[in-house]
């Protein structure tokens, strides 16, 4: 049962099994998944922004700063969590099911990136975070893609597969 409140008194009068601090992309996805159980989940968010200065509006690295982009690191980076740092089971292949579980991906072909598609082994289709490729491009992107491909940079239609190299259309 969802119970949304902005009242501090109402929030404090309830009992929660888990309290998540931060209602951004990750916090709400986590709360959504945890609420599929019988756990009572509370989410604390900062509330209205009382600061009029844009530089303090978002934390560094948040989806608000990063243009709402979704991108996975390379397979080599995730594999290093296991091989370099010794975190057994923390590699691209073992994390991929969890990446997919968070995502609900829809293909959005564009004039510049025609190969956009949902790849079942790579993209999730039933998760709480909706993703798709960008299908709007400024007038600068066409010449950029043409220049990059003329310099032997290949278009990579699927950077979520563990290989983010090449010219990509961000999600």
Image (cartoon, grey):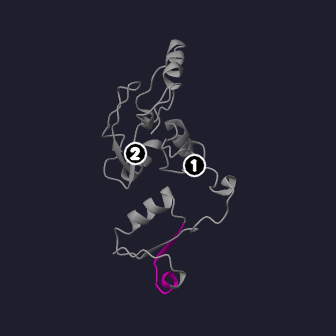
Residue stretch in magenta? 10-21
The front one of 35 and 22 is: 22
Relative image position of residue 129 (x, y in whole percent): 40, 52
Q: Who comes first in sequence, dot 2 or dot 1? A: 1
Q: Is residue 51 above or below residue 14?
A: above
Relative image position of residue 73 (x, y in whole percent): 52, 40
Which tag is nearer the camera, tag 2 or tag 1? 2
Of the 4 image quadrants, the one containing the N terminus is: bottom left
- Residue labelled with disc 2: 131
Q: Confirm whether the magenta stretch covers residue 20.
A: yes
User: Could you say whether the residue bearing mark 2 is in a helix, strand or loop?
Assistant: strand
Q: Callout 2: few (<14), some (14-19), or many (20+) C-alpha neighbours within 10 Å?
A: many
- Residue labelled with disc 1: 86
Residue at the (50%, 46%) spot, across then down: 68
The tally of labels here is 2
Q: Is residue 115 above or below residue 72?
A: above
Residue 57 figure quarter? bottom right
Residue at the (60%, 43%) spot, across then down: 84
Residue at the (50%, 29%) spot, across then down: 138
Q: Is residue 14 above or below residue 25?
A: below
């Amino acid at each position: 049962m969802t119970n949304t409140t902005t009242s501090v008194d109402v929030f404090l009068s309830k009992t929660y099994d888990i309290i998540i601090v931060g209602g951004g992309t990750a916090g709400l996805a986590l709360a959504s998944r945890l609420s599929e159980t019988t756990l009572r989940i509370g989410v604390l968010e900062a509330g209205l922004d009382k600061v009029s200065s844009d530089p303090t509006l978002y934390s560094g690295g948040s989806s608000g700063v990063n243009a709402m982009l979704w991108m996975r690191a390379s397979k080599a980076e995730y594999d290093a969590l296991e091989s370099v740092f010794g975190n057994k089971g923390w590699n691209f292949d073992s994390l991929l099911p969890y990446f997919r579980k968070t995502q609900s991906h829809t293909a959005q072909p564009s004039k510049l990136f025609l190969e956009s598609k949902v790849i079942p082994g790579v993209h999730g289709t039933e998760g709480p975070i909706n993703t798709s490729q960008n299908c709007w491009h400024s007038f600068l992107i066409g010449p950029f893609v043409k220049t990059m491909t003329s310099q032997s940079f290949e278009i990579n239609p699927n950077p979520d597969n563990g290989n983010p190299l090449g010219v990509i259309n961000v999600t």
